[in-house]
């Protein structure tokens, strides 16, 4: 599926940053089957396109995502839990993705590109799941964040019962899951689920600024390997993960990004991996 075919997401790309915007503002960006498929394709393009180094995920119209579409949930409940999968093709998982990560919501963990969620307004239920599978989260101080599952009679969905304790610790995760209480951005940051808390109206700009700095100042190859080491290699034993890290270090010594890093160090200037990439493209 091409970006031009999206109907529930908007994607813009500039300076190495792809801003992916959930675009159902009339439904407060309620999560739908088509939106899930389009998000997978947006991440696939971010993983495979050379002009994308970082993804910023946000929502249109003031909210990030209020959760699953309540109309769809009503229909599923009325049909005693039965539902049909969205009849659209899905992109492949990146080569080498272990079976443990071949799950729909874990797809962001398998791509080489960092994903930063910029949270405003409501972030609940399926929106909480979506944000949790991003690499980093920036939130507005007045953001309203909740797991919401227990209030709806649902379990911790899509691996969140495994993931959340590793993000905020076991007791905090249990409290957030059991009570489904609402956090603002500042409290979510104190717990460690949010990495940056900003004034309302500034979150997206700050997230894009951070992403642009990352795209220019950090090696795309380093980001690719580090993300794989943190998420994919976590499925391995330590000895195997350590051996892979040594092999990757030896490969990095031959990679062109090292030349730019050393040149910047000698010249006492910031690294510019985007310029180095553009120059290589012109030579081709």
Image (cartoon, rainbow, N blue to C red):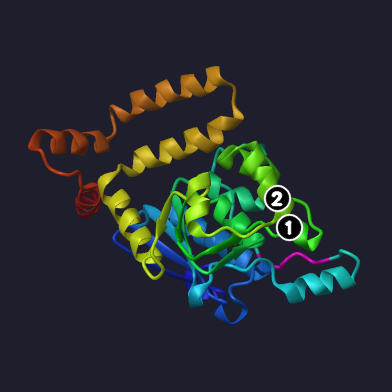
Figure check: 57 above or below 239: below
Tell me the tag on residue 95: none
Residue 276 left/right relative to 79: left
Seen at 62% across and 55% down, the residue is 129
Q: Which residues are magenta?
A: 83-88
Image label count: 2
Judge by depth and name the residue closer to the eye, 89 or 178. 178
Figure check: 21 above or below 174: below
Q: Neighbour class for label 1 at 10 Å: few (<14), some, many (≥20)?
A: many
Tag 2 or tag 1, which sits nearer the N-term?
Answer: 1
Q: Do labels 1 and 2 touch, CB within 8 Å? A: yes
Give the residue pinned by disc 1.
149
State which quadrant residue 172 falls in: top right
Judge by depth and name the residue closer to the eye, 138 or 126. 138
Give the residue pinned by disc 2.
177
Seen at 67% across and 69% down, the residue is 32
Q: Position of residue 180 (x, y in %)?
A: 69, 56
Q: Of all residues shown, which one is farthest toward the bottom?
A: 26
State which quadrant residue 131 falls in: bottom right
């Amino acid at each position: 599926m091409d970006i031009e075919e999206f109907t529930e997401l908007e994607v813009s790309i500039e300076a190495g940053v792809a801003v992916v915007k959930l675009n159902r503002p009339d439904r407060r960006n309620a999560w739908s089957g088509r939106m899930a498929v389009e998000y997978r394709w947006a991440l696939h393009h971010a993983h495979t396109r050379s002009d994308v180094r970082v993804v910023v995920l946000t929502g249109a119209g003031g909210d990030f995502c209020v959760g699953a579409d309540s109309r769809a949930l009503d229909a599923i409940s009325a049909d005693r839990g039965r539902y049909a999968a969205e009849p659209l093709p899905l992109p492949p998982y990146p080569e080498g993705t272990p079976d443990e990560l071949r799950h729909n919501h874990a797809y962001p963990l398998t791509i080489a590109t960092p994903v930063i969620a910029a949270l405003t307004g409501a972030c609940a239920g399926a929106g909480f799941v979506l944000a949790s599978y991003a690499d980093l989260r920036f939130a507005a101080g007045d953001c309203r964040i909740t797991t919401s599952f227990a209030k709806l009679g649902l379990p911790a969905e899509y691996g969140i019962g495994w993931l959340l304790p590793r993000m905020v610790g076991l007791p905090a995760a249990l409290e957030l899951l059991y009570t489904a209480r609402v956090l603002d951005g500042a409290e979510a940051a104190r717990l460690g689920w949010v990495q940056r808390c900003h004034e309302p109206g500034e979150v997206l700009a700050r997230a894009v600024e951070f992403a642009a700095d990352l795209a220019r100042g950090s090696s795309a190859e380093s980001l690719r390997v580090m993300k794989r080491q943190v998420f994919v290699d976590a499925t391995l034993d330590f000895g195997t993960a350590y051996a892979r890290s040594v092999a990757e270090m030896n490969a990095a010594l031959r990679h062109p990004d090292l030349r730019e890093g050393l040149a910047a160090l000698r010249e006492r200037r910031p690294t510019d991996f985007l310029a180095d990439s553009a120059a290589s493209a012109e030579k081709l």
